[in-house]
Amino acid sequence: MSSEADRVWVVERAKALGFDLCGIVRVDAEKFPELQNFAEWLDRGYAAEMSYLDDPRRAEPSLVMQDLRSVIVCALNYNTAHGYSTDVAAEPQNGPPRGWISRYAWGGDYHKVMWEKLNTLAAALNERFPQPFATRAYADTGPVAERIYAKYAGLGWLGKNTLLLNETYGSWLFLGVIFTSLDLPASLGPAEAPAPDLCGNCRQCLDACPTDALVEPYVLDARRCISYLTIELRGTIPEEFREALGWQVYGCDICQDVCPYNRKAPVSSLREFEPRAFDGDRSLFHPLLEWLAQMTEQEFRDTFRNSAMKRTKWAGLVRNACIALGNGNIPAQGADRPRIEELLKRRIQSEILSIAESAAWALHRIQQKPE
């Protein structure tokens, strides 16, 4: 087994590469009870249509890599100085209707940023460890539950909104892991417990969720989650959730925006996570809904080539933007209304059912508003 000095070297090298947090957990030293409970969560149907979650490697880390001994967990702060969705939504909205994109998708593709740093760290291990060993890095890209390994590596606790929470950084953290056959010391000693759950009696995240997706503390029903509905779900969004989606067009930050720990989180120094801006008044921060709703498939590919927003695909983004327009405050006598109604009428003609049906729902909503 490697020494404590080796563990310190790994953590220091990770932070030198720009990671804000780093910890190590030995896979033979923890039972990972959350992984053992995962099957019950799946049996309840809470994974919705995300069949890829039903992968035995998620519950059994030894299936991920042969001779697995340790998991190096790294975290990168992605918070910015821009306002939170719950604050901006409370401000008077003037001008054309706008939507909201989850904070993590404003900048460049976080998978790429994390992947490059993780692989650089994995390569650097050769400087310290001369013996043959294997590594495999994941940045939200494989059948692993990064947040659970992060908990047992000492990076924080799992909050009531199911996300990893750190007392300093809140939940504004991208997580990545390096599975390795190196026998490294754990960040937490045998007698040390993971970080205590500091959520206490707070339930702001549960109470703020518009769709009641947090069915109880620490339990998420993805079928009701706005992030799932706007990103992972293919086809039409159930009508019972459309009004609750509000202006969300990609993901949702509400349960994070109201968290007291996120309210005091520091801002990231990485420019990669700042909102991307395009020609004219086009930005991924508080974006114009008409821009997104009328976007062509080629424009979608060009705009989101290096973005996590590729995940929702073109049809999903247009569908979401149409629903957000239907939820928008569009005055009957305003200059925007005829233009938006015409846009939705064009989208009703789409051969893609999810777009046509969402546009029809939105147009009906707008036309039902009093003159």
Image (tube, helix red, strand yellow):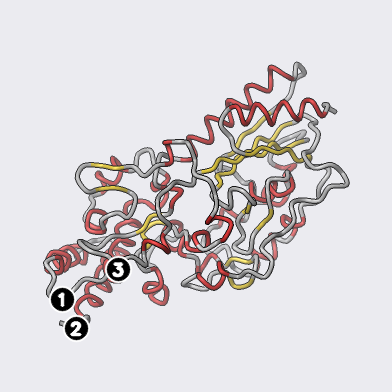
Cα distance in 3D space between marks 1 and 3? 20 Å
Front one among 101 and 16: 16
Name the residue tied to disc 1: 332
Please tell me how crowded label 1 is: few (under 14), some (14-19), or many (20+) other residues with Cα within 10 Å: some
- Residue 215 locus on image (x, y percent): 59, 73
Say which quarter of the image contains residue 235. Answer: bottom left
Front one among 49 and 161: 161
Name the residue tied to disc 3: 358
Tell me the residue at 54%/73% (across/down).
207
Tell whether label 3 touches label 2 (CB within 8 Å): no
- Residue 178 locus on image (x, y percent): 65, 35
* Tag 1: amino acid: Ala
Please tell me how crowded label 3 is: few (under 14), some (14-19), or many (20+) other residues with Cα within 10 Å: many
Tell whether label 2 touches label 1 (CB within 8 Å): yes
Tell me the residue at 58%/25% (across/down).
120
Q: Is residue 29 above or below residue 232?
A: above
* Tag 3: amino acid: Ser
Mark linked to residue 370:
2
Front one among 32 and 12: 12
- Of the residues tagged 2 and 3, which is closer to the observer? 2
Q: Secondary structure at mark 2?
A: loop
- Residue 200 locus on image (x, y percent): 69, 66
Say which quarter of the image contains residue 46. Answer: bottom right
Tell me the residue at 77%/56% (across/down).
33
